[in-house]
Image (spheres, rainbow, N blue to C red):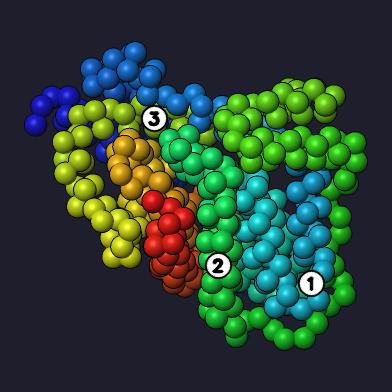
Amino acid sequence: MSYHSAAALLIFGLVYGIILAGSKSPRKLDRPAAALIGAVLMVLTGVLTKHEAQEAISLSTLSLLFGMMIVIHYATQAGLLDRAAHAFLARCHTAWQLLVAVCLASGLLSALFVNDTICLLMTPLLLTITHRAKLRPEPYLIALATSSNVGSVMTLTGNPQNMLIGQSSHWTWAQYALRMVPVGLLCLLLNGLIVAAVYRKHIPAGSLPQSSEPPAHNHLHRKLAMRTLITLTGLLAAFALGMPMDLAALTAAIVILVLANRNPEHAFAAVDWALLLFFAGLFVVVAGVTRTESHWITQVIPAIIEHTGSIGQLTRFSAATIAGGNLFSNVPFVMLLRNWIVDLPHAPLLWLALAASATFSGNLTLLGSVANLIVAEKARDNCNLSFMEFLKVGVPTTVITTMAAVIMLSAYVHLGIVK
C-alpha cells in the first residue's frame, strides 16, 4: 500500500469515526468539523493538490442546496408550511385518520420542501395534538419521520442525496418525478400500513376529543405567502421544463429576496451553512479516497451491478446501498458511488435504484437520517423516542419499501420505461 493510499484511508476512517460517534466524538467535534478536518488533511498529506480539492467541490450542488434553503425559509416565515400541515391534520376526527394524515402530509410535503424541514415543523404540532387527545405520541412521531423519508424519494429536491443524484445523473426533475412518484406513493402506503400494524393496539377507536383541534401556531402573512407561492410555482415550472436545478433554485432565491421586501440578513442567517460546509468537505474527502482506492472499488462495483435489470441484481445493489448508507451515512455513500455509476450502461436505472435504497436506508434505525434525529430531539422533553422503539418500524419498513421499489423498477425495465 502506497503512502497516499494509506493516508487517504486513515483520513477517511478518522472523518467517519467522528461522524458515527456523534455527540460522543472526541473534542466535541460535529459532522461539519469532521468533514473540514478531513478535507484539509487530504491536501496537507498530498493525497490531493489544492487545485484537485477545489475541483472536487460541486458548486452546482451547493448552489441548489443554498437556493432551496432561501426559498424554504420564506415559505416557513410566511406560515405556508405550517398552514399546509394544519390543513391536513385539522380534518382528522379519529386517531386512525390522524395517522393517515400524518403519513400523507409528511410524505407529500417532504417531496417539495425537503424532509428535514417538514420534520422540524410538524413535530411540535404533533406533540400538541397527541397530548390534547391523550394519544400515545410514538406511533405518530415514527410515522412522521419514516413517511418524510419515504416521501422525499419522489423528487430530486426531496432530500440532500437526491440533490446529489440530480446533479450527477442525466435525469431532469420532471423525468425523475414521473417515474418515482408512483414508487413513493406505493411505499408511503406500505409504510403507513406497517406503522398501523406495529401500533394497532395503541391507536384507539372512536372520535378524538373536540379540544384536540390545534390552534393556529403561526399567523399566515398573506402578502409574503402570495409572493412565496408565486416563486414556488415558478420554481416547480422551471424544474418541470428541464432548467438546470441549481440555476432554477438560485433564480428563485433571488426572486423571493426581492419580492419579500424584508431584510435579507434573516434569510441568510437561516441558511444551514454548517450543512454546506459538511458537503464541501465531504466532496474533498471522497475525492481523495476515490483517487487512491479506485482500483478495488472498480472491482467490487461490477459484481454488484452486472445484469442490473433483473430483480436479483437490483436487490443486491439495493442491499449494498442500505448497508453502505447506514455504515457511512447515505449522503457520503452516494458521493462515493456517483463517480462510477455515471458511465455505466445501466446508469439511468442505477440512479433510480440508488435514490430509492439510499433514501429508504434512512428508515432502518433512529440514527439513519437527520430527519429521524430531528424528530427525536424535538420530542425529547415530551416523549423519549428510543433506538429500539424506532427499530420496531424501521426494520420492516426499510425491507418492504426497498423490495417494493426494486419490483417496480424491474417492471419499468421490462416495460421499456427505464433502460
Q: Does 40 appear above or below 249?
A: above
- Counting every numbered tag in the picture gives 3
- Choose top left, top right, bottom left or bottom right for residue 98: bottom right
Residue at image position (78%, 54%) is: 84
Name the secondary structure under disc 2: helix
Amino acid on which the number 1 mark rests in the picture: Cys
> Could you give the CA–CA distance between mark 3 and mark 2, rounded to whole angstroms?
33 Å
- The percent position of residue 403, horizontal first and vertical second, equals 40, 67
In this rendering, the label closer to the viewer, 3 or 2: 2
Disc 3: CA contacts within 10 A as few (<14), some (14-19) or many (>=20): many
Q: Earlier in the sequence, mark 2 or mark 1?
A: 1
Lower sequence index among marks 3 and 2: 2
Residue 82: x, y in percent? 78, 51
For marks 2 and 1, give the one nearer the viewer: 2
Residue marked by disc 1: 92
Q: Tell me the CA gap for discs 1 and 3.
A: 44 Å
Viewer-proximal residue among 302 and 397: 302
Residue 384: x %, y % from top left: 57, 64
Bin the neighbour count of mark 2 within 10 Å (Cα to Cα): few under 14, some 14-19, many 20 and up. Answer: some
In this rendering, position of residue 73 left or right of residue 385: right
Q: Which residue is mark 3?
A: 283
Where disc 1 sits, the SS reads: loop
Picture quarter with the N terminus: top left
Judging by the rendered image, the residue that carries numbered circle 2 is 186
Mark 3 falls on what kind of element? helix
Which quadrant of the figure has residue 338? top left
Which amino acid is tagged 3?
Phe
Q: Which one is earlier in the sequence, the residue at label 1 or at label 3?
A: 1
Rounded to the nearest angstrom, the CA distance separating label 2 from label 1 is 22 Å
User: What numbered label is drawn on residue 353?
Assistant: none
Q: Give the camera-side residue of 96 and 253.
A: 253
